[in-house]
Amino acid sequence: MEIYVFDDTFEGFLTLIFDWYNRKPGSITVSSAKHYHPQAFSQTYFIVTDPEKAMRVATGLRKRLSKEAWRAVYCTFLSERLEAYEHLFGFAVYVFSDVSQAESNYGNEHVLFVHQMARKVEREKHHLEAFVRFQQTQDGMYYAPIEPKYNVLPLIAGHFRGRYADQSWVIYDHVRKYGLYYDLQRLQLITLDFQRSHNFDTPARISEDHHEEMYQLLWKDYFKSANIPARRNLKLHVRNLPRRFWKYLTEKQVLD
Amino acid sequence: MNFNRASEKLQILADAAKYDVSCASSGGNRKNTNKGLGDSKANGICHSFTEDGRCVSLLKILLTNHCIYDCAFCVSRKSNDIQRAAFTVEEVVELTINFYRRNYIEGLFLSSGIFKNADYTMERLLRIVKKLRLEERFNGYIHLKTIPGASEELIQEAGLYADRMSINLEMPTEAGLKTVAPEKSHEDVKKPLHFVNQHIQAYNSDRKLILSTPKFVPAGQSTQMVVGATPESDLEIMATADQFYKAYNLKRVYYSGYVPIRQDSLLPSIGTPPPMIRENRLYQTDWLMRFYGFRVNEILDDTHPNLDPEIDPKLSWALRNLHLFPIDINTADYQLILRVPGIGVGSAKKIVAARQFGKLRTYQLQNLGIAYNRAKYFVRCADSPFASKDWQASQIRHFILSSSQNKRQSPQQLTLF
Ligand code: SF4
């Protein structure tokens, strides 16, 4: 079976679908460059990402899908899971086969997978909107490091932009090495270079004149006082506040 | 702001406010249109969870824990020998803004003991919300407690800046309330609820005519009842909730399991664990009323005045109504599918959507994310054997209980039926 490899971008993935229809090779295996391992008995076809092809596939899908289902496709893609790419491919082929209302046939394995994966990604997005913690740095900017399970930065951008319109901020994904920077006017993507020049690699230097530390301590005070010991339930606590987020949660930083 | 003093006040005044369970920041819809700080979306966000597992979404504090009243169940009551404190208007504003900027909270939940008199206290709350909205251009969520007995002008003005207002019923019945707080009555609660509700309706109909009409308490009103401090039955509690939902269009009723805070002959003694399972069952019942089309009397009546602690109210209802089951997943009404134990709103919708593509078989139903081990006694699929076993209610109950025994979840979690 031929392996189709795209360049990890959404556009690349859409181009892959286009090329498959063009070349009609029968069944294939889908992989992104990051997941790809050459295999002895399979041919590999490397996709050359082409914005025009991608756009045509996107338009075709959007015509056949509701807004929600199109978003589910994008969210599933952002999961960056190998099996997600496989299912998305199967989903697209199913949708293009012109079954009516294809997206709600939850009895179909690809439809169900896309639906469920999208929910997981949306949950991660929601978690991030909740658990991002900004620290004010010396230059007055608010900085938040994150390590999300899925690539949700594109999904949370609008949320933080709408919320923090009058302060400049950076949210930096330390797993994927890129971030968002809002400068009171525009929202920009920033990468490692930017991060170095701004010294974000070492934890942002906390501002003293902005009382950053004081507000962190007050928040910890509040967190402690809001607890009702008679109702203590650590299992529930950990389920609601998964441990993987603690690293960056101000209130979970124990004082030395 | 002086850190040490602020820290001390925060500890005292957050500690005193924590027994108020309403924490949701939902229902707000205040867009950031002034390039100011923050906006509120219809679905609130829990920014953290305390070690007891409750959601932290708002900075929930009292303006002061000084109080001229002496309600037996309350930490702030006059006769209680505790440290007193009061925030200044500026302190509350600064804390709110700075916590919000760091994404710790969705907004402010401000309540207060009554110092001097109701109006004096209410006037201060009003100054805080005005400063937040007008000077700081804050668009985050604000939940304000109405001070019982405050004058209508103050309440009305506060309603222009708050997203939600609430006033607590405290005990589920008038009789219960009288035993622990003789100075209070449900009437004192009904009056402001009625007043605010009338204004919400009036502003809403004005808005239909003139779009520039300001929003008044856009996220609506809520109330809270303390459960387990006084001897009311679950039926009495839910009947009160139902009545208040209907009479005042409440957005939420909260049920707060009583945590004994002092030795008092009128109240459960210190060390009595808070009735967490009961509280959970009440929330489930509330949920069934609001989203599943159940009426109170279907779940609770004079022969069953209390909820079953062992099984959830939906299962309990189904077991008492076995004659309605099993239903055919491929033909039954949506409303009936909703009533199947183990099937929630989301999966009921998916079932109705998916069955248009062909009859659903058991494995497909299982894949839809329902609690099949629970639902299987109440449904039939395309491939269900023709003669299914005729279990007795007590048998089904036993099967479900023993299969969930091992993975028994903490009683506090709201399971989704
Ligand atoms: S009036 Fe309110 S604050 Fe004062 S004692 Fe009663 S419940 Fe507590």
Image (tube, rainbow, N blue to C red):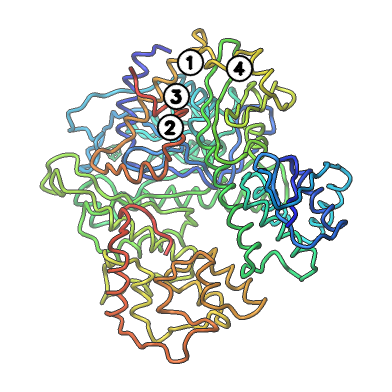
Residue at the image position 86 percent from the left and 42 percent from the top: A51
Q: Are marks 3 and 2 on the same chain?
A: no
Do the residues at discs 1 and 3 belong to one chain?
no
Q: Residue furthest front?
A: A40
Tell me the residue that label 2 is attached to. Answer: A246
Residue B5 appears at what percent x and percent y? 34, 15
- Residue B44 is tagged as none
State the residue at coordinates (74%, 25%).
A186
Q: How many marks?
A: 4
Q: Mark 4 to mark 1: distance in Å?
A: 11 Å
Q: Nearer the viewer, mark 3 or mark 4?
A: 4
Identify which residue is drawn at 72% across, 52% down: A42
Give residue A141's mark: 4
Of callouts 4 and 1, the N-terminal one: 4
**Which labelled disc corresponds to residue B92?**
3
Under mark 3, the amino acid is: Val
Q: Nearer the viewer, mark 1 or mark 3?
A: 1
The Cα atoms of the two marked residues, 1 and 2, are separated by 19 Å
Residue with the mark numbered 1: A212
The amino acid on which the numbered mark 2 sits, given as a three-letter code, is Trp
CA neighbours of label 4 inside 10 A, class few (<14), some (14 to 19), many (20+): some
**Which of the pair B205/B398 is nearer the observer?**
B398
Q: Are marks 1 and 2 on the same chain?
A: yes
Chain on which label 1 sits: A
**Image quadrant of ligand 1?**
top left
Q: Quadrant of the C terminus of chain B?
A: bottom left
What residue type is disc 1 on?
Glu
Q: Secondary structure at mark 2?
A: helix
